[in-house]
Image: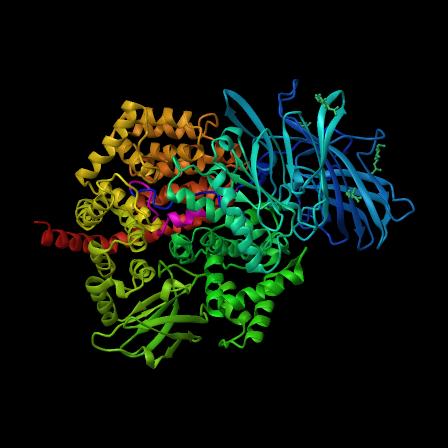
Amino acid sequence: MRKGFYISTPVGVVAIILCAGALATIIGLSVVYSQEKAKNNDVAPTEGGISTKPPATTSVPSNDPWDNYRLPKSLVPECYNVILWPRLTPDMTTGLYIFTGESSVDFECAEETDLILIHSNKLNYTEFDNKILANLTSLTGGKAPPINSSWLQDVTQYLVIQLDGKLMKGHRYRLYTKFTGELADDLGGFYRSKYLEDGKEKIVATTQMQPTDARKAFPCFDEPAMKATFNITILHDHGTVALSNGEQKESGNYTINGNHVLKTVFEPTPKMSTYLLAFIVSDFDSISSNTVNDVLIRIFARRTAIAAGHGQYALNITGTILQFFEDYYNVSYPLPKSDQIALPDFNAGAMENWGLITYRETALLYNEDFSSNSNKERVATIIAHELAHMWFGNLVTLKWWNDLWLNEGFASYVEYLGADKAEPEWKVKDLIVLNDVHRVFAIDALASSHPLSSKEEDIQTPAQINELFDAISYSKGASVLRMLSDFLTEDVFKMGLQTYLTEFEYGNAVYTDLWKHLQMAVNASGITLPDSVRNIMNTWVLQMGFPVVTINTSTAVVSQQHFLLDPDSEVSTPSPFQYQWIVPIKWMKNAVNHSTLWLQTESANIDEMSVSGDDWVLANLDVVGYYRVNYDQGNWENLLRILSTSHSLIPRINRAQLVDDAFNLARARIIPTVLALRTTKYLYSEREYMPWQSAMNNLDFFYLMFDRSEVYGPLQDYLRKQVTPLFEHYKNLTGNWSSVPDGHMDQYNQVNAISLACKTGVKECHNLTATWFNQWMDTKENMIQPNLRSTVYCNAIAAGGADEWEFAWSQFQNATIAIEADKLRYALACTKQPWLLNRYLEYTLNPSLIRKQDATSTIVYIAQNVIGQSLAWDFVRARWSYIFTQYGGGSFSFSNLINGVTERFSSEYELHPLKQFKADNAVVGFGSGTLALDQSIERTMGNIKWIAENKQNVLDWLEAETKYTSH
Ligand SMILES: *[C@@H]1O[C@H](CO)[C@@H](O)[C@H](O)[C@H]1NC(C)=O
Ligand SMILES: *[C@@H]1O[C@H](CO)[C@@H](O)[C@H](O)[C@H]1NC(C)=O
Ligand SMILES: *[C@@H]1O[C@H](CO)[C@@H](O)[C@H](O)[C@H]1NC(C)=O
Ligand SMILES: *[C@@H]1O[C@H](CO)[C@@H](O)[C@H](O)[C@H]1NC(C)=O
Ligand SMILES: [Zn+2]
């Protein structure tokens, strides 16, 4: 799955530019499945013949197998036959949208047992033969034991069937059930999405199974290692299309209970996990091409979107990317077709259902009149991410969710390789440093972080599984795999991957299986490493955090230390490696690359790194290593000098690194804050995107901490001075803003130039954005370049009043293109009018105004606005229990929400209510936001200390800088 909460990278500084300490934590996947809701709603016993066995002791933990979240190993599914009939109109009497279904599963008995446990959540069962709701037959001959009793175990989400006799080892059986479920708008399991087209409201029935919601569509052994084949049949209305993982086998008229419908049967799937199933009924249209080895590639979307060509870009690049991965894995695409579909309501960014990938509209559709280059990049990288899973994740699946990091980290790494293949001019591979490495550093530097790898027994409940879909799994996973691929070399990495995929195809593996295959490749290739792949990687995978490597160029001592953003924070989790790592160091001396060195102990003498005079050392080239670097004062001075005199001697990724490392080392009180600020002085002559973005990410922390204090004025003055040449540069480059810069990165940096210039009060910038926006309001024709829209809208709405806001709101409501609607939804949060912000907050809980999938991010946008911050916090606090119970079902990412509304907290007056909030809602709970709440408290305490120690220095430095040059 691809994380859903997305803030387009260069979207504008006014409210949103990533704060290294905070926004980073917001990228965790916005998936909160129905489990939170389930915990709060007692699911009533069902209508049908299921006797709700009254285990009087349910509240007391028991050792009964049905109270265990994990399935016993006694039964092994082989093959399912599932017929589902979703109704796209509400039931006349109940008003509910429902689906009905029948399912049979063939399984083998691996250990004698008289108990069948099969997952089932929120399904109602009907009865047969007056008594029994499920029938069991033997496929091996003989009679299956009769059913003694059966009931639904709501907490663990099982259908429990107790038999009057034993199932025999080695025998095969078939269990048949008939059921009804609700096709709710809860974004999980089999659910409904709604949209308006040609003035008509239309309904789509679609699915999101990962991680534990297949059981909400039909009873199944819903664990990733319980692979089976699936025969899917969908009944649906004439005029609609049914899709599933497999190819359509036949589709024809069918009559059921007097209803004339279509019956579409799909080819059996390969052996696969339940969480990768998908079935969709819609009246969507599609475009197709046949490019890679006869694999049929199709893009599905709303009819108007297809007619307008918005699927074309996705179709064009999919073939290239599929081909790339076939070569990369050296395994051909395992299925005969690859469908990708854009859904109006979808919680994550995208989901890698095998052969039928689902996306948010903004993650698949592209239109050059509306999409920015960032939107386009997102389409390319998400497609690459999901296609990468077709092998890594789908063909070979991790045995249990505790290894999720390998699945998601891998896809999050190779998405850059796939996108690079499709768009080589973009140099998109570099961006992993900003988007993943730097971003996750901010979280992984907290004492409340956690290791990549979790123990299987620690991950049991759906909520625990959901909590794993976080930035650590995605971005740290991607970062350490990139480092691994680099020190092994890409060829060796690929070789290990290829044999791994071949050994485990259609099966399951654990992460150490990959290490084993990479080691085989290392041995075959003859490259030398300081230790085994497993031992090196264990230090990165089994302990949380990462080191700061300190290079003292005067003594030649190189040492490492666990990097903590707050050095006083207490690390309560012991590490098997005492927080030491086996660190590959790529480095240069005076702009000449040297061969990689390894730091394997706490400190070592590395004579080559001793320099003197004007000579300088720079380590962690291209930030391939997952660590920060500090130097002795002399080397820092030399690096600052090179930045100001000839910055191109330092690779641009490392210019971004120097800024990011310096600011973070300063926050950890390892170097003075003033030294960090000095890394921004050279920006006056910097034109590249990555260093600027890095600086803006870090300075955003200064804005968060100081935008309500006396430091704000001098900070503005200083940055206005720094950004003015960049603003002028783009003005000239684009012929007074009339054309679009050629390069992808240049386009990003143009947005930065405008955002920061407007933010810091460059008059010309304000005039520019106001003029463009007013032109749009006057003529009703939007001439603003797509790349600049977010920033222009935001600045114009911030500078304007109710008229601008209402205009943008009506544009938002009438927008037929999700990409455009998203930009407006973001910009509406930029107003400085508290009453507009408060009203907007109210809108977020009204699904007819703001889609549920967008509620969290909208509240977070509002909180990022200095005026909106306290309003959003009050709003969330006041409504927590309502939000938690009503919106728990799939649409709210509580961790994003909590991190988002608390990121500016930096005083005792904010810490106290935050702790109070935790205490007050202990009963309601925080679901997937539990960890985020603790992190917010830790972060707030760190911020309080930081301000106390730094405010005066920062103020003095900024004043000196601006006095000295400004007149
Ligand atoms: C699934 O379909 C295949 C081919 O149509 C058939 O051979 C198989 O028996 C079916 N499986 C089940 C469980 O009905
Ligand atoms: C289960 O029982 C129903 C009703 O008697 C019957 O129609 C169906 O064929 C049976 N299914 C199996 C798998 O035995
Ligand atoms: C399932 O049964 C419960 C309890 O009778 C009922 O409230 C719910 O609406 C039923 N669901 C469907 C989809 O019929
Ligand atoms: C199938 O049903 C549709 C609509 O009821 C009808 O127009 C069509 O002729 C039917 N096709 C066949 C082959 O019976
Ligand atoms: Zn993924």
Q: Compared to 689, does 812 lie above or below?
A: above
Q: Quadrant of residue 434?
A: bottom left
- Report if residue 820 is visible in the image: yes
Residue 364 painted magenta: no
Q: What range is drawn magenta here?
A: 14-31
Position of 880 compared to 788: left or right?
A: right
Position of 454 compared to 704: left or right?
A: right
Position of 686 compared to 166: left or right?
A: left
Residue that lies at the very extreme toward the right in this rendered image: 142
- Report if residue 468 is visible in the image: no
Task: Locate residue 399, reporting x and y percent.
Answer: 64, 56
> Which color scheme does this rendered protein use?
rainbow
Q: Quadrant of ligand 2?
A: top right
Task: Locate residue 937, reporting x and y percent.
Answer: 39, 49
Q: Compared to 793, does 323 lie above or below?
A: below
Could you tell me which residue is drawn at 45 percent across and 56 percent down?
449
Q: Nearer the viewer, residue 898 or 787?
A: 787
Q: Compared to 179, does 10 lie above or below?
A: below
- Magenta stretch secondary structure, dominant: loop
Task: Locate residue 589, reporting x and y percent.
Answer: 30, 73
Could you tell me which residue is drawn at 53 percent across and 66 percent down?
493
Q: Nearer the viewer, residue 750 or 139?
A: 750
Position of 87 compared to 654: left or right?
A: right
